């Protein structure tokens, strides 16, 4: 394999692999399309609760008002709660954004190159959507480029354009194909010291992007990471994600 694999190639290979792992690919060009897709997935995910009647425009607007415009920390709490919406006929529906108990039962999609306008126009590399919400954002650099560059790019995006539904991002992944790390989102300044390599049970690092996709971005695994292995730190009002050895220690106890 060439050492000069372009970012675009790396991106396409990653998407191909995630599709093989059961993610549905969806083309999302901008924020409008992101919202439309979110609405479709919310209806799908809450089909039983909604008695097969999709949310009306007014009902969906109520939901959006409830969950929008919050801090990253608050959005993380909203993600894990149910939201009561009074329906047009006066009945109440409890809308779930993310199934934290049976995490495999969420809806998994992947998209790339979504253009978002904030202070500047940004195009995001790869986004993993769960029930239509962008929960994992992946920034890729070509081989030979320091991963710190991908990290700095995420910091820039965070300052410029991670608004609206992007406030729900829980995890970031950075990779140059050879090295891959993950870290939690937050309202605070992101710190490169809190980026982690994933490892297997024997503490061997899984750094290569392909392997990382197989192990860490396995649908059930990544949803479980969000459901069970992220800490909502009330004292410091911050989101934290466990390191591999902590995850394995908890798994052992469980």
Image: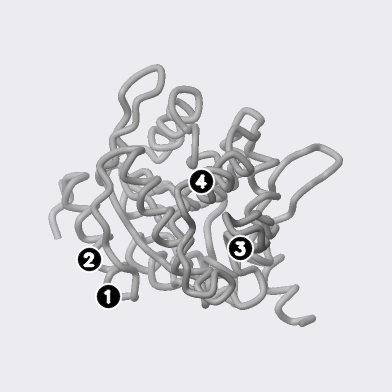
Q: Which residue is mark 4?
A: 58
What secondary structure is found at the residue carrying circle 1?
helix
Q: Earlier in the sequence, mark 4 or mark 3?
A: 4
What secondary structure is found at the residue carrying circle 4?
helix
Q: Earlier in the sequence, mark 2 or mark 3?
A: 2
Question: How dense is the environment of label 3, judged by Cα within 10 Å: few (below 14), some, or many (20 and up)?
Answer: many
Alpha carbon separation for disc pair 2 and 4 = 37 Å
Q: Which residue is mark 3?
A: 96
The residue positioned 39% from the left and 48% from the top of the image is 138
Circles 4, 1 touching at the beta carbon (< 8 Å): no
Alpha carbon separation for disc pair 4 and 1 = 37 Å
- The nearer-to-camera label among 3 and 1 is 3
Q: Which residue is mark 2?
A: 16
- The nearer-to-camera label among 2 and 4 is 4
Question: How dense is the environment of label 4, judged by Cα within 10 Å: few (below 14), some, or many (20 and up)?
Answer: few
Q: As rendered, which of 11 and 136 lies closer to the eye?
A: 136
Alpha carbon separation for disc pair 4 and 3 = 18 Å
What secondary structure is found at the residue carrying circle 3?
strand
Circles 1, 2 touching at the beta carbon (< 8 Å): yes
Alpha carbon separation for disc pair 3 and 1 = 27 Å
């Amino acid at each position: 394999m060439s050492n000069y694999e372009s970012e675009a190639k790396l991106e396409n290979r990653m998407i191909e692999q995630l599709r093989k792992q059961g993610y549905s690919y969806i083309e999302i060009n901008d924020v409008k399309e992101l919202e439309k897709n979110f609405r479709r997935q919310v209806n799908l995910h809450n089909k039983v609760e909604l008695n097969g009647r999709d949310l009306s425009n007014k009902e969906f607007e109520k939901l959006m008002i409830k969950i929008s415009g919050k801090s990253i920390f608050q959005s993380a709490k909203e993600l894990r709660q149910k939201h009561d919406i009074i329906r047009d006929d006066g009945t109440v529906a409890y809308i779930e954004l993310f199934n934290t108990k049976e995490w495999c039962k969420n809806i998994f999609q992947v998209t790339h190159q979504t253009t978002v306008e904030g202070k500047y126009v940004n195009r995001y590399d790869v986004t993993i959507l769960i029930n239509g919400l962008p929960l994992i954002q992946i920034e890729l650099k070509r081989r030979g480029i320091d991963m710190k560059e991908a990290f700095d790019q995420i910091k820039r995006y965070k300052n410029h354009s991670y608004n609206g539904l992007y406030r729900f991002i829980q995890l970031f992944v950075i990779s140059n194909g050879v090295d891959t790390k993950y870290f939690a989102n937050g309202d605070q300044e992101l710190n490169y010291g809190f980026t982690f390599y994933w490892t297997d049970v024997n503490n061997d690092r899984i750094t290569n992007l392909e392997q990382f996709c197989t192990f860490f971005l396995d649908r059930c695994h990544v949803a479980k990471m969000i459901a069970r292995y992220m800490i909502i730190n009330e004292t410091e009002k911050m989101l934290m994600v466990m390191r591999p050895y902590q995850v394995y220690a908890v798994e052992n106890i469980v």
